[in-house]
Image (cartoon, rainbow, N blue to C red):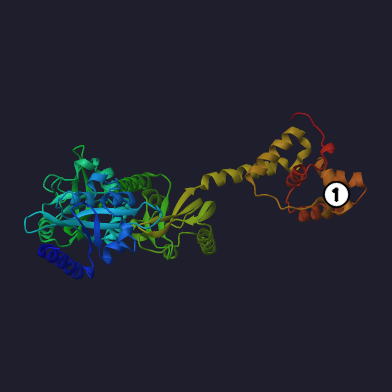
Amino acid sequence: MSQDVLTTETNRRQLQQIIAGLSDGVILLDPDQSIRWANEAALAMHGVSRVSDLGPDAKAYTQRFVLRYRNNHRVPVDSYPINRVACGETFGDVVVEVNPTADAEERAWVHRVRSLVLADSQGEPESLVLIMDDVTDWANAEQRFEKTFAANPAPAVICRLSDLRYIKVNPGFLEMTGYARDQVIGTSTYELDVLEQAENKELAKQRLREGGTIPQMSAELRLRDGGSKQVIVAGQPLDLNDEACMLFSFVDMEPRRKAEVALRQSEERFAKAFRLSPVPILVCAAAEQVVLDVNEAFLDTLGYSSEEVLGVTMAQIDFIDDKSARTRLFAALEKAGRLDRIEVRLRKKDAGLIDCAVSAETVNIQDNRCYLLVLMDITERKRTELELVSAIEEVMKDASWFSRTLIEKLANVKSVNSPKLASVSFADLTARERDVLGLICEGLADKEIAARLKLAPNTVRNHVAMVYSKLDVHSRSEAIVWARERGLFSGEWRSRGPL
């Protein structure tokens, strides 16, 4: 063996000893593409324990391991780093994912690979070297970031600080602005200025140049269709692939602005309806019942001025005539949250009284729980109803003069305009009281009933009084209505003919 060969072998052994303990993986190939040696780190990065497990040469290596780029596309065999260095090519920082072909479920590694060609004294390739870093953890973290960034519903873009060009954009930003991905990626921040008309643009630009945090501020974002959108923008510096970058995130203020406009319009419509309503309306706080607002109809109807009622409690104004009625009304409103046409008597400022049907609803005004009370004046209606009932009572005192049809109609009118009679069973009456009630329904007077039953007139009057008391009625007409509502004595009604 020549001296040159011995020297070469000695140098190679010394080189192997030097690199054996390195954390970087190293694979040595001979110029004939055979795999000569690999250190422990390189073997661990391929999931094997012996050099022979890598394969005897570069071709066998390509059959035992599948390589993919970071975009998951398979690396062509000719582009495998081991084949490239076998051809004498020198390259740096090629990132590939390595999978053993024997078991697709086995874990994969991500390598950052570079090459080195060692030449002899004549300049001929003597050793081919692959040097690799295990960047699996970094790649996994980057993959998690990519998934999180893409899935984040908040619109976001990332620009590289070295040249201020956008390198990443998520679907939320594209959807909000209408741009396509290729219209954003590679574009300069000067072309697509996300800080345009920012609330504090000078501070934002300064922080961008310095790579500092950009605080939240309002801005106007230009859209693809030429329009613009009000947003809240913020910037957060971060390192991505060992490059300083800025993550811009956005909050779309357009839905909020539209909601505010709609709310303002709704409030304006409510205010107009409130003011112009001819029915008295009052708004008071639910807690202390302090009057917050009243309309003109309320002031005109009750005779107060706005200064006398606004900011004053309902108890202090004291316009509900019956204090216990006021207590019951608000207790019911507190329990049910709403009221529907509850009759209450109100006292005007000049001491006059009016009857009102009160409807109320619980409402939220500027996040405060309030009561909205609508007061419908029913004084004239009540007076008319009472007069009608009184007239019917007077007419029906002697029902014997009326036909069955007319009595039924009068009874129905009275029933509609009078309180509901108490629920009493026919069985509560004695046999004699039932006889008396039956004859009343026939239209007989007390003397006629006495003659029919062969009783003294005073005895009949006592029976009639007991019937009234048990049925909770006050006249013959009410007793007849009570019996008719229950279908009693229907066969005993006699048609007296038309009046």
| Residue 337 point in image, percent of width and height | 50, 57
Q: Locate residue 457 relative to residue 81 in the image: left or right.
A: right
Considering the numbered disc 1 on the image, is that residue within a helix, a strand or a loop?
A: helix
Q: Quadrant of residue 122?
A: bottom left
| Residue 449 point in image, percent of width and height | 87, 45
- Check the image and name the residue furthest to the top: 498
Q: Locate residue 382 relative to residue 237 in the image: left or right.
A: right
Question: Looking at the image, is 171 positioned above or below residue 1?
Answer: above
Give, as a three-letter code, the residue at label 1.
Arg
Disc 1: CA contacts within 10 A as few (<14), some (14-19) or many (>=20):
some
Q: Nearer the viewer, residue 276 or 63?
A: 63
- Check the image and name the residue furthest to the right: 454
Residue visible at 51% across and 58% down?
A: 333
Residue 219 visible? The answer is no
Residue visible at 82% across and 37% down?
A: 493
Residue visible at 32% across and 63% down?
A: 50
Residue beneath disc 1: 434
Q: Which quarter of the rendering shows the C terminus? A: top right
Q: Nearer the viewer, residue 44 or 371?
A: 44
| Residue 181 point in image, percent of width and height | 23, 42
| Residue 208 point in image, percent of width and height | 13, 57
Question: Looking at the image, is 459 positioned above or below residue 490?
Answer: below
Question: Looking at the image, is 390 positioned above or below residue 313?
Answer: above
Q: Nearer the viewer, residue 378 or 176?
A: 176
Q: Nearer the viewer, residue 212 or 319?
A: 212
